[in-house]
Every structure is written in C-alpha cells, then in structure tokens.
Image: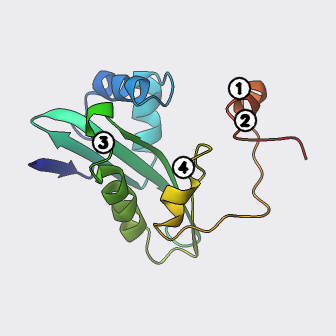
Amino acid sequence: MNLKWIYNSDNINWNELSNLYKIAPLGDKKPNDLKTVFSNSMFKCFVYSDNILIGVGRALADGIDCSYICDVAIHPKYKGQGIGKKIVNKLIELSKGHNKIILYSYPGKEQFYSKLGFDMMNTAMAIFKNKEQAREWQLTRKT
C-alpha cells in the first residue's frame, strides 16, 4: 500500500476530515472546529491512500513540558493494518524532548497504547463540556 504522509494542515479538506471522524467513529466534529484545533496543534499527521484521507492524529504541545496526543482516527477499511500505530509513533517521535507525553483513550484501547509505551495514570482528571456523555462513554467516573 502506497501511503502519503503530510505533517501540516495547509491543504486539508476539513469536510473530508469531519467525515473521517464520523465513520471512524469518533463523533461529530465540525469542519471549522477541526480547522481551529489542528491549526493550534504543534504536531499533526494526515495519511492518504490514493488521495483518500485514511488516518489522522495530532498533538497539542508547548515545546518543553507537555505534549498531548489526541484525535487519532483511522478509516474503518484500513483498521488493523498498523496505520494507527504508525501515526501514534510519529507523534511520539515529534514530541521527543517533552517532559511528558499524555493521551487518553477510549475504554478498551488501553492495551493498544500500552504496547506503544504508555503507562496508566493514577491521578488523571478531566472536565468535559458534556459530562453525561463522557460518563456514558466511560471516559470519566465520579470520584
């Protein structure tokens, strides 16, 4: 498979990216919101096969202390081919030198990230805009 990797968001079709998140499925993310969050992210990976966006990920980073990997999504037809692993590894590589690299995963994906070097955190906390949905998706729980 011939993949094209892009590390900037200069010519991204935000509607295509929005659709990828829907079918991945990682939720309904609006094209203009995606443009904002990717533009504000220090590191990003877009993966294409035959000019079709099949994988994506980004990292918010401050350049020294913290890099937060998020929004990794793979087109359903391309899952299980190691593309997600390559995206995360590239974001880890780009984040080298930071004191910590953080991510949170959906329940059931912890083993995947553990194999990539991530350890479980004991004290991670979050405030979600939609607390009920976060609890429904088992991203958070009451303390």
Disc number for residue 133: 1
Q: Earlier in the sequence, mark 4 or mark 3?
A: 3
Q: Earlier in the sequence, mark 3 or mark 1?
A: 3
Q: Nearer the viewer, mark 3 or mark 2?
A: 3
Q: 125 or 85, which lies in front?
A: 85
Look at the numbered disc 3 and give the secondary structure of its residue: strand
Disc 2 from disc 4: Cα separation: 20 Å
Q: Is residue 59 above or below residue 24?
A: below
Left or right: where does residue 76 sit relative to residue 4?
Answer: right
Residues packed near mark 2 inside 10 Å, few (<14), some (14 to 19) or many (20 plus):
few
Q: Quick check: marks 2 and 1 in contact, CB under 8 Å?
A: yes
Q: Can residue 61 be seen by looking at this rendering?
A: no
Q: Nearer the viewer, mark 4 or mark 3?
A: 4
Q: 135 or 60, which lies in front?
A: 135
> Residue 1, image x and y in percent?
10, 48
Instruction: Name the residue that disc number 3 marks.
Output: 55
Q: Earlier in the sequence, mark 2 or mark 1?
A: 2
Q: Earlier in the sequence, mark 4 or mark 1?
A: 4
Residue drawn 71% across the image and 33% down it: 134
Disc number for residue 109: 4
Disc 4 from disc 1: Cα separation: 18 Å
Q: Amino acid at mark 2?
A: Phe
Disc number for residue 26: none
> Residue 70, image x and y in percent?
50, 48
Q: 57 or 26, which lies in front?
A: 26
Look at the numbered disc 1 and give the secondary structure of its residue: helix
Q: Amino acid at mark 3?
A: Gly
Q: Quadrant of residue 48?
A: top left
Look at the numbered disc 4 and give the secondary structure of its residue: loop
Residues packed near mark 1 inside 10 Å, few (<14), some (14 to 19) or many (20 plus):
few
